[in-house]
Image (tube, rainbow, N blue to C red):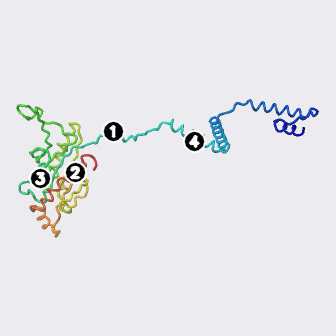
Amino acid sequence: MANTQARAHVVSSTPISRPDDPDLKNNSVESDEQDLIFNTTTPQSRKAERKAKKNQSSTNSANSSDSNSTPAANESSKQTSSTSTSVKQRKPKISIPPSLTSPMPPGKNFALLVCSLGNPTPTYTNTLHSAGHTILSQIQQRGLYQPFHRSLAGGLTSTPNTTSYNFNVFKGYTKSVSGSRPVLDDEDDFTLWQSPSLMNVSGKAVAQAWKKWSAEMRREGREGRLVVVHDELESALGKITVKDGGSSARGHNGLKSCQASLGGVKWWRVGIGIGRPESREPNVVANYVLSKMNGRERDAIEGAAIHVVYALREIAEGRR
């Protein structure tokens, strides 16, 4: 009998209940109900279990990062986001300097009456004292100018070559009916004039030439300037100087004569250096300035003609 009970205890999966013990009976029923509830859950496959674990792990890490972020960091992130958004939406403002868009004011070019001082040709041709005449001859030969002719108080005058030509297939180039054209803006509007008088009394002829020429400019509605080109005894050979006409003549009798004759006329002067002798004796100086140029002196003075042109252009453009 004892053996039978032992086998029955081993075989049975439930504890032996006592009919007279109500606690054991109730516990047995509750255990059975719990087993029934657990057993009703649908079993998951291994793949589903792995997926569920992965989702659970991602959720936990996200919650952990959210909990670790501070309010200051969140606020900074919001500000950065809003700033980047506003930068993207704001259109850049491009401002172009007015100097790049507005046209340059037109330059004002004055016509020039360029008068050279010296002594009459041919006796005093190519002497140092007539360096002004040499300069104007070089400008006339190298530039686009008409040949010298007598005009304006008897002086030798040369004007820009503005001859107008027409082209014909059969006749080639021929002069137009009008004969000439206006001086273009990029051309030198210089009237070259060589004084016919002796150096020491040249002022009267210069004043007469200026009076006639400036009156013609006014009739054409133009404004002109007067420039006197002369030799400069105190300057190095070939050196160019530009001064106001009223400045000290420094013993130059031709300039003194011009200052006396022109009165209140505004004028400029361009000097060409001819050097000076070692002695300052008047006779030595007179013989020096009236002597013929040697090869070196002539090359230096003729070579200065281009620099005289540059100075004349500055005066014509109002830069002096």
Mark toward the viewer: 3 or 4 = 4
Mark toward the viewer: 4 or 2 = 4
Which residue is denoted by mark 4 in the rendering? 80
Say which label, 3 or 2, has the lower sequence index: 3
| Residue 92 vs residue 64, the one in the foreground | 64
Say which label, 3 or 4, has the lower sequence index: 4
* Residue at x 20% of width, y 50% of height: 309
Q: Counting other residues with Cα less than 10 Å from the Cα at mark 4, is it few (<14), some (14-19), or many (20 or more)? A: few
Question: Which numbered circle lies on residue 197?
Answer: 3
Question: Which numbered circle lies on residue 237?
Answer: none
Q: Picture coordinates of residue 200 (x, y %)?
A: 14, 57
Which residue is denoted by mark 2 in the rendering? 310
Say which label, 3 or 1, has the lower sequence index: 1
Q: Calculate the distance from the C-alpha at mark 3 to the C-alpha at mark 4.
A: 89 Å
Say which label, 2 or 1, has the lower sequence index: 1
Q: Picture coordinates of residue 252 (x, y %)?
A: 19, 59
> Where is 311 relative to 2, above or below?
below
Which residue is denoted by mark 1 in the rendering? 103
Mark toward the viewer: 2 or 1 = 1
* Tag 2: amino acid: Tyr
Say which label, 4 or 1, has the lower sequence index: 4
Q: Calculate the distance from the C-alpha at mark 2 to the C-alpha at mark 1.
A: 26 Å
| Residue 40 vs residue 317, the one in the foreground | 40
* Figure quadrant of residue 159: top left
Direction bottom: furthest residue: 279
Say which label, 4 or 2, has the lower sequence index: 4
